[in-house]
Image (spheres, rainbow, N blue to C red):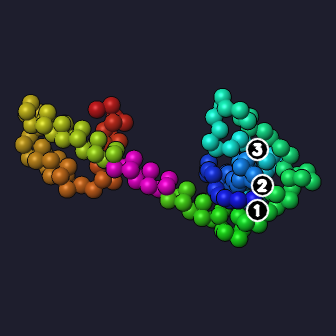
């Protein structure tokens, strides 16, 4: 058993993989970190679908007398390396970064839309100059969270 690693995190599920004799294997762990009853056997990484020796992923019984020791060795390595906690932490950090990026993008879009609104109001003299100046001042000095809140409110109102 070589190259034991996390191959994927999808919400609460974690995929753990390893290689053995040039073949790739993986098992999915449930929310509690326990392996599911299927051990997936995959062809070597460098073999393409039309190459000799290629096969589609095979589902094996992870609890039988041949595979259970492999899965137990895998899980021992996972526990020893604290791979589950490290994978969950990396996943949470990645998700937090995605949310932060989305908020920044939303703030930029709302900020631009609100700037266009100020420009339109100014050009058409739809509001008293003091109101437009106050709105412009808010737009210039507001935090991203404030811009998102106002932008979402305006968007929700159909403006």
- Direction bottom: furthest residue: 80
Residue at the image point whose x is 79% and y is 63% from the top: 73
Q: CA distance from mark 1 to mark 2?
A: 8 Å
Rendered location of residue 140, percent (x, y)? 17, 52
Residue 97 in the magenta stretch? The answer is yes
Q: Position of residue 72 (x, y in %)?
A: 82, 61
> Label 3 belongs to which residue?
41
Image quarter (top left, top right, bottom left or bottom right) of the C terminus: top left
Q: Position of residue 145 (x, y in %)?
A: 33, 53
The reply to whether callout 3 and callout 2 are in contact (CB within 8 Å) is no
Q: Secondary structure at mark 3?
A: strand
Density class for disc 2 (Cα within 10 Å; few <14, some 14-19, many ≥20) is: many
| First along the sequence among labels 3 and 2 | 2
Residue 104 seen from this side: yes
Question: Which quadrant holds residue 118?
Answer: top left
Mark 3 is surrounded, within 10 Å at the Cα level, by few (under 14), some (14 to 19) or many (20 or more) other residues, namely: many
Relative side of 89 to 14, left or right: left
Asked whether 142 or 67 is in front, the reply is 67
Circles 1 and 2: CB atoms closer than 8 Å:
yes
Point out the tag, 3 or 1, that comes first from the N-terminus: 3
Q: Give the residue furthest to the right.
A: 65
Q: Which residues are magenta?
A: 94-104
Q: Residue at x 79, y 47 (%)?
A: 39
Label for residue 35?
A: 2
**Helix or strand or loop: what does disc 2 sit on?**
strand
Placement of the N terminus among the 4 image quadrants = bottom right
């Amino acid at each position: 058993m070589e190259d034991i690693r996390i191959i994927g995190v999808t919400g609460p599920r974690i995929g753990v993989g390893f290689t053995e004799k040039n073949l790739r294997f993986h098992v999915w762990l449930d929310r509690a970190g326990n392996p599911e009853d299927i051990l997936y056997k995959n062809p070597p990484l460098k073999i393409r679908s039309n190459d000799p020796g290629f096969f589609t992923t095979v589902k094996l019984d992870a609890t039988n007398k041949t595979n259970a020791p492999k899965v137990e060795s895998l899980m021992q390595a996972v526990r020893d390396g604290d791979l589950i906690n490290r994978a969950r932490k990396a996943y949470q950090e990645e998700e937090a970064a995605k949310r932060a990026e989305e908020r920044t993008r939303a703030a930029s879009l709302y900020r631009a839309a609100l700037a266009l609104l100020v420009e339109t109001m100014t050009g058409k003299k739809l509001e008293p100059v003091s109101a437009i100046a106050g709105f412009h001042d808010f737009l210039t000095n507001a935090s991203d969270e404030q811009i998102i809140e106002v932008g979402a409110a305006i968007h929700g109102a159909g403006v």
